[in-house]
Amino acid sequence: MATRTHVRRVRMLYKTILRLHRGLPAEIRILGDGYVRDEFRRHKGCVESEADVFLHEWTNYAVSLAEQLGLKGPHTSRPLGRYLKEEDLQKLRDEQVCQLYELMIAATGNPDGTRGKT
């Protein structure tokens, strides 16, 4: 019974995040949806302790995104997202840092993180 509840919670979080992504600009939505699908698929068979951290972090993401998007879509006066704290960056494994870097390049189009493609 606990397993079924866990699966239901994971599925609900996954669907919630994809629904929230509908409020993002099209190019960011495509990138975000693909990233979410990949991450949820990769963590499908993880151990319980990793699953707890995974669900906690993705729940925080969903709450943060919902706050940023508001009821009527993205607020034009402030950008979406937030900066990572230095201590959070220190906790990442090397492969996670590489993945974050690749995500930044995909989002900005440039290895230095500036907006716009040249």
Image: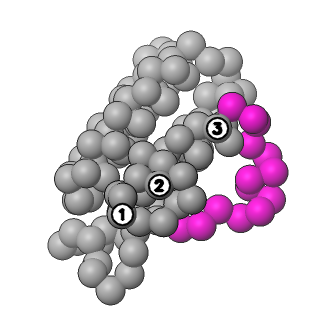
Q: What residue sits right under mark 1 in the picture?
A: 116
Task: Read off the magenta span.
Answer: 82-95
Going from the N terminus, do you reach mark 1 or mark 2 first? 2
Q: What residue sits right under mark 3 in the picture?
A: 98
Q: Secondary structure at mark 2?
A: loop
Dot label at residue 2: none
Distance CA(mark 1)–CA(mark 2): 7 Å
Q: Is residue 58 magenta?
A: no
Residue 50 picture location, percent across and down: 68, 28
Q: What residue sits right under mark 2 in the picture?
A: 110
Going from the N terminus, do you reach mark 1 or mark 3 first? 3
Residue at coordinates 39% horizontally, 75% vertically from top-left?
79
Q: What amino acid type is highlighted by mark number 1?
A: Gly
Residue 72 picture location, percent across and down: 18, 73
Residue 117 picture location, percent across and down: 35, 58
Residue 52 picture location, percent across and down: 64, 34
Going from the N terminus, do you reach mark 2 or mark 3 first? 3
Q: Please name whichever residue, 75 or 48, is drawn nearer the observer in this view of the structure.
A: 75
Residue at coordinates 67% horizontally, 22% vertically from top-left?
48
Q: Residues within 10 Å of mark 1 (few under 14, many from 20)?
A: few
Residue 18 shows in this picture: no
